[in-house]
Image (cartoon, grey):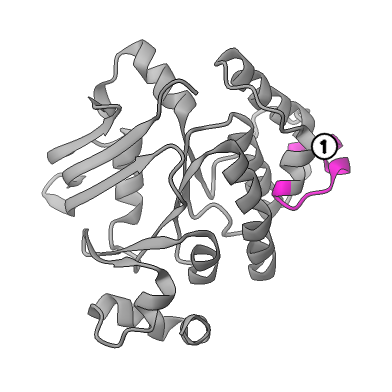
Amino acid sequence: MATHAVLRADDLWAGYPGTHVLRGVNLEIRSGDAPLGIVGPSGAGKTTLVRALHGQIRPVQGTVTFNDRPVHRLPRREGKTFKASVRFTSQDSLTVTDPRLTVARSLGLALGEARKAGRTHATSMGDLLDAVGLPAGFSTRRLVTLSGGEKQRVALAAALATRPEILVLDEPLTAVDPQSRVNLARRLAGLLAELDTAVVLVSHDLELVERTCREVHVLSEGTFVATGPLGELLGDAEQHPTVRELAEAAPLAAQRFR
């Protein structure tokens, strides 16, 4: 790709009328970066951060920029580039409006979108399904017949099909069983590296984050309070109280990381 996508938050304060949920967050993601995790307790501001990065809410103070332009007011052409370059996938990303739509058709539309944007790649539909732990024969299934976990996997495959430079995953696999999430982390790593896609994984699933991301930011009360490899953070008794709470809430995971 000719240019590198850069999504950046500088001294980001954001929230809702009368409430500052985020308080001075700084974050930079460049295409090709190693996967980055963001973890924290409920109410820490994770969803607000994702919405601000997406341009769905406007900063109260500071900026969120894509290639140095504010994401909440990108001109039309640059807005299209942003939409193609930066993909956001959440636990509810796959909305089925046509009961006849199949998995193959859904992924075919995404691959077609990549071609139109000049983002073609050699990854086949079978490769995409394999990356999310689904058999090739799954392509004939209609979306309306899928379970919640299967829909989340297909949504992730569709996002990968567009070959984004940055992929922001907000609790993308909540309906997938824990063991399958671990297997998915292994499968996805190779394809993400091949596509040179930077990933931001926002999740409460510490094992998924640890297996996917070299480094994490811990978000607490709207600000990052710790940064580093998750295993090192959880194993440090002198860390921030929120880090200790995360370790105590997932004792088996914390023990494995030490």
Image quadrant of residue 119? top right
As for residue 39 lying within the magenta part, the answer is no
Q: Position of residue 65 (x, y in %)?
A: 26, 32
- Residue situated in front as seen by the camera: 105 or 10: 10
30 above or below 133? Answer: above
Asked if residue 227 lies left or right of residue 204, the reply is left
64 above or below 41? Answer: above
Q: Residue at x 30, y 48 (%)?
A: 49
Q: Residue at x 24, y 27 (%)?
A: 68
Q: Residue at x 57, y 31 (%)?
A: 163
Mark 1 = which residue?
139
Q: Position of residue 54 (x, y in %)?
A: 35, 36
50 above or below 81? Answer: below
Asked if residue 256 lies left or right of residue 53, the reply is right
Kind of residue at disc 1 = Ser
Image quadrant of residue 249? bottom left
- Residue 49 seen in the current view: yes
- Residue situated in front as seen by the camera: 167 or 88: 167
Element type at mark 1: helix
How crowded pointer 1 is (Cα within 10 Å; few <14, some 14-19, many 20+) is rated as: some
Image quadrant of residue 126? top right
125 above or below 29? Answer: above
- Residue 95 seen in the current view: no
As for residue 142 lying within the magenta part, the answer is yes
User: Magenta segment range?
Assistant: 131-144
Q: Position of residue 187 (x, y in %)?
A: 68, 54
Q: Position of residue 143 (x, y in %)?
A: 74, 38
Q: Residue furthest right?
A: 137
Tally of numbered discs: 1
Q: Residue at x 84, y 48 (%)?
A: 135
